[in-house]
Image: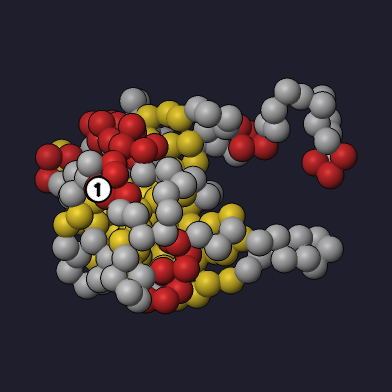
């Protein structure tokens, strides 16, 4: 089949997010100027640079994560392990502003080293980030789409040593959770390696 998104797909549900998947989940913790904590998962999340290490998340609408990151210029991207999937999902609740998703989901806020927002103590890894920019993407017609893209430089990294194997982060053991389409998720349960080819060879 072929379809143009602006004209509709004719399927029971929009397949776009299922096609662009799996998408890693950035479990974003922030703190507002008034000290309010927020924790929310974002599947529009990824790394965009290695040197320096930069990550981004996109909020569809002005939600607390983007608002608080804009206020304090800091956030933590926590990695969702297999055993935390249900608590991650619970933290996505549309709670009133001021509600602590840490408490609601039964999670422990742990102090960060270089930023104010706490990390999820139970997470297999966490990235402390300082905001480098926030921008509002536009559609082809130039209209603001109502999203907020937050980019942060990773200034500190926490790794639970239980997930280190011979000095490498064991993604299979951690079972990094990713978002698929519809109501579906996946976890990493297998890894295979391929060496990048070089033209000279």
Q: Position of residue 123 (x, y in %)?
A: 23, 45
Q: Position of residue 91 (x, y in %)?
A: 36, 44
Q: Position of residue 73 (x, y in %)?
A: 39, 75
Q: Quadrant of residue 87?
A: top left
Q: With respect to residue 106, does 27 lie above or below?
A: below
Q: Residues within 10 Å of mark 1 (few under 14, many from 20)?
A: few
Taking depth in this image into account, of 26 and 159 the one nearest to the observer is 26
Q: Element type at marker 1?
A: helix
**Colour scheme in the image?**
secondary structure
Circle 1 sits on which residue? 103
Q: Quadrant of residue 178?
A: top left
Taking depth in this image into account, of 95 and 161 the one nearest to the observer is 95
Tell me what residue is drawn at x 53 percent, y 29 percent: 183
Asked if residue 26 shows in the view, the reply is no
Q: With respect to residue 193, does 150 lie above or below?
A: below
Tell me what residue is drawn at x 30 percent, y 31 percent: 82
Q: Quadrant of residue 117?
A: bottom left
From the viewer's perspective, tell me whether residue 100 is left or right of residue 89: left
């Amino acid at each position: 089949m072929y379809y143009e998104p602006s004209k509709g797909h004719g399927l029971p549900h929009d397949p776009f997010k299922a096609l662009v998947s799996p998408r890693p989940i950035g479990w974003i913790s922030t703190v507002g100027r008034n000290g309010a904590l927020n924790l929310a998962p974002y599947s529009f999340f990824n790394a965009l640079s290695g040197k320096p290490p930069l990550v981004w998340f996109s909020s569809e609408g002005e939600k607390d994560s983007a608002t608080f990151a804009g206020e304090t210029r800091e956030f933590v991207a926590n990695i969702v392990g297999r055993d935390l999937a249900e608590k991650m999902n619970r933290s996505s609740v549309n709670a009133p502003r001021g509600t602590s998703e840490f408490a609601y989901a039964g999670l422990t806020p742990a102090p960060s080293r270089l930023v104010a927002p706490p990390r999820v103590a139970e997470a297999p890894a966490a990235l402390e980030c300082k905001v480098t920019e926030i921008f509002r993407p536009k559609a082809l017609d130039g209209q603001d789409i109502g999203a907020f893209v937050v980019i942060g430089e990773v200034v500190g990294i926490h790794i639970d040593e239980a997930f280190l194997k011979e000095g490498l982060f064991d993604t299979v053991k951690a079972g990094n959770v990713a978002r698929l389409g519809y109501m579906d998720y996946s976890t990493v349960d297998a890894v295979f390696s391929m060496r990048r080819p070089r033209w000279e060879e």
